[in-house]
Image: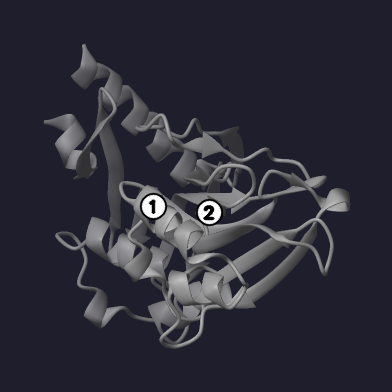
Amino acid sequence: MIVLIGVAIGIVLMAVLYYNNVIFNFSTDKEDNSEDLELMENSSATKFGYLRDSFYFDTRKIKKNDALGSILYWQDVDFSVIKDVIEKSKGVIDVKSIVENNNYTLVRKNECGELLSLVYEPDKFSYVIFNLEDSVYVKKVYRDIDTKIEYAEGEVESSLWNAMVDLGLNSSLIDKMEDALASEVDFYHAQKGDKFKLLFEKKYINGKPVAIGNLIGAIYTNSEPNTAIYFFDNGTTKGYYNEKSFLQ
């Protein structure tokens, strides 16, 4: 039954790729594998869970050789509190792994107020709150992500790379298409007039694109159409299948 469902989905995706220029919008539920992880409220009235109008936010960049302890020290945080923060960071984040040029934000009630928390952003998708107010705690929060399934098509004029970049497509999508069709297409010999169609996931945070997700389907046409579909079996990715795979 699962195989038949997969075949049906593959056929539908092929039909969409062949005949339609469409965009599907849907929100995905993020898996939460720890009780310590919380989803950020998707509200312009808040920042890192704090009311924007009630707090002062001082955002800076991690400098070379910066460490969490030294940053807190220069903000006049007591040694005992710094030690507690580092201890409670275990299992949440390795404080030695903070990366140069990543953002961190100092949160106060006002510009000259006592430091309430330090918020570190390890990537686009999450942030870590080192809370110093009342009692020390450390938690990692995942931002709400909207995933849209988008469609793109183009034609090679000078190179496949230029054709996709001219459409505003992320370089990671080029790599995904080449991986999906590697057994069918020699991309080193792409020629003028070759055509491609793609269905892919694009991830947004607060309406802004942040990353490319899965390449769901691809057709690359040179002398003949070459098709790849991303196949799922009960939620587990099985890889890319072409038309012949579905017909076998």
Residue 54 screen position, x and y as percent: 86, 49
Quadrant of the image containing the C terminus: top left
> Quick check: marks 2 and 1 in contact, CB under 8 Å?
yes
Q: Which residue is drawn at 42% across and 66% down?
A: 195
Q: What element carries label 2?
A: strand
- Kindly identify which numbered label has been placed on residue 200: none
Residue furthest out toward the right:
53
Q: Of the residues shown, which amino acid type is indicated by label 1?
A: Ser
Q: Name the residue under label 2.
A: 130
Residue 171 as seen in the image, left or right of residue 130: left
Residue furthest out toward the top:
1
Q: Residue at x 14, y 60 (%)?
A: 183
Q: Name the residue under label 1.
A: 89
Residue 109 screen position, x and y as percent: 81, 56
Q: Earlier in the sequence, mark 2 or mark 1?
A: 1
Residue 62 screen position, x and y as percent: 52, 78
Q: Which residue is drawn at 34% across and 68% down?
A: 97
**For mark 2, does the 10 Å Cα neighbourhood hold few (<14), some (14 to 19), or many (20 or more) residues?**
many
**For mark 1, does the 10 Å Cα neighbourhood hold few (<14), some (14 to 19), or many (20 or more) residues?**
some
Residue 187 as seen in the image, left or right of residue 26: left
